[in-house]
Image: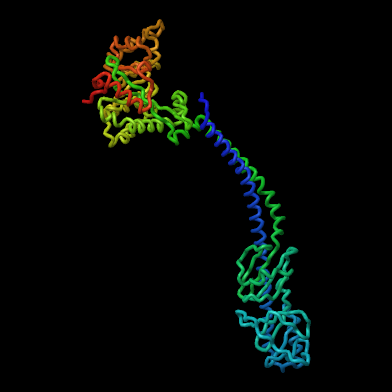
Amino acid sequence: MKTTTITGEACLERSRIVVIAGILAALGAILPMLAAYYLSWSIAVRNEQAQLARLADSAVMRADSALKEATRALKTANRFGMPACAEAHVSAMRSLVVNTAAIEDIGYFENGLLRCTSWGAPPRHLVRSPPADFTTDNGIEVIARTYPTISTGVAMTAFRDRSYTALTNPVRFVDVIAEPGTRIAVATRTGIVVSTLNEPHASLTARLADLPKTGKDAEDLFATSRGSNWIAVASAPSIAILNDMDRERLLLLPAGALIAALMVGLVVWLSRRRLSPLGELSIAVQRREFVVHYQPLIELKSGICVGAEALVRWRRPDGQMVRPDLFIPLAEENGLIEEITDQVIYAMIAELRTILLADRSLHIAVNLAADDIKSGRILPMMDTALKSTGILPQQIWLEATERGFMDVKSARATIEEARRRGHSVAIDDFGTGYSSLQYLQELPLDALKIDKSFIDTIGTDSATSSITPHIIDIAKSLDLHVVAEGIERQEQADYLIERGVQYGQGWLFSKALPAAEFIAFYNNSKRQRGAGPAVIRREIA
């Protein structure tokens, strides 16, 4: 496909597309890799927090288990029926401690003072029962931290029920299998810490009661678990997820690289499409870059302008015009021609409405694509475009080349409907195809336009010069208007007038003109001849 040289703004447009494509390609290469990195980090964080949540759940379960065993021991002690602190009583308490894994000692209190424990009599100084930190849902009072005076000097957690208090080593609550560096804290439901592992940060334990289920602070990832009596938090340094990230990256980076390659390929493909002739034409359709020029139609005898043929031109953003023969075939092949035709019709109505209303004998011919003739969709579209404009259908001629008539059945239906609505229909570039005579015989046409290639042979010894008068005779025999295209010499015009050809167009009279120049040409033609233009539209019964 031949293309025109693109300069000025067109080059800038291409440069802009190339720059944008480069940026998009870079983003397409980088973003999937960043996404893979972020995803691997997110998965590693989620996995680590899930592991921490399991550890926190285990800590709450162990605290509940210790509470359950201590409760059972206390209930058993409360059923002892022997004298308090007698040898049998102390022996029974000692047996209860030995057979209950979760408690280290048990003591008997009377009036708030310790009278004896499973170790025997207390020291001489008075040992008072401390106040409870909270009461469990089964009625057991809990003292978070207390120091026994007989058994050991290690801080214990005490469970109290009536006269008996059982001591549990809180290390049991955090006795779980955890990675080095993992930190655990167990607290009462009111937030009083009772046991820790690996010294969790105070920033977590201080607000343990208010922590969300999972989260991250400046240094740690954490997860919490809440039971009816206990809260546990497990935390680990954020750096601990790096090993997991490495594993996830090994899985995700190849997928990220593949996606990056696909995205870069897509950007390249799309940019090439936009920079291709078809891509540029599609953009031109979207931006409505098409303008209409008007080739005056002249009554040969009088020299009066009686109409014009609307010719589409593609005006690039830099002002350069692209010839129709360079883009019309591409538009027809790729389904863009119908939208271009619509733009031509609406532009023509907007530009020439005033003179069409002022002179009802003036007509404008619009070229139709083969698909328009085959489908007939142009007719309702034309009705919509003309509605409320005051322009008569008789003032709009429809022209099509022989290729538009190849499906004779569909073409006949469209032409008959067009004529019924008031439009005249002409066959354009007659004589350049192989079936022209067949179309003239089978289709209800109004006008025949002789192709420029035949007009060029007038006054020459060309082998085809004898065909032109035959074409004229055929048109006359079928009572068709005859329009000669491409008249460039007075000799050609004289020849055509002599043979009764009514109308012509070509550079002898004028080139195709923008709307304002055509209107000026038309008005000047009327003034010079001093009479109104001849009526050449088909009369409607």
Q: Is 508 placed left or right of 12 in the picture?
A: left
User: Where's residue 500, x and y in %?
Assistant: 28, 12
Indicate the quadrant where residue 204 lies: bottom right
Q: Nearer the viewer, residue 433 or 32?
A: 32
Identify the residue at the far top of this view.
461
Q: Is 358 placed left or right of 262 in the picture?
A: left
Identify the residue at the far bottom of this view.
83
User: Where's residue 460, x and y in %?
Assistant: 40, 6
User: Where's residue 295, x and y in %?
Assistant: 36, 22
Indicate the quadrant where residue 444 lies: top left
Q: How many marks?
A: 0
On the question of residue 273 being in view, the answer is no
Residue at 45% across / 27% down in the picture?
A: 321
On the question of residue 133 being in view, the answer is yes
Is the residue 81 above or below the residue 283 in the image? below
User: Where's residue 518, x and y in %?
Assistant: 34, 25
Quarter of the picture containing the C terminus is: top left
Residue at 62% across / 42% down in the picture?
A: 26
Indicate the quadrant where residue 259 lies: top right
- Colour scheme of the rendered structure: rainbow
Q: Nearer the viewer, residue 456 or 78?
A: 456
Q: Nearer the viewer, residue 138 or 203?
A: 203
Identify the residue at the far left of this view.
541
Q: Is 29 placed left or right of 430 in the picture?
A: right
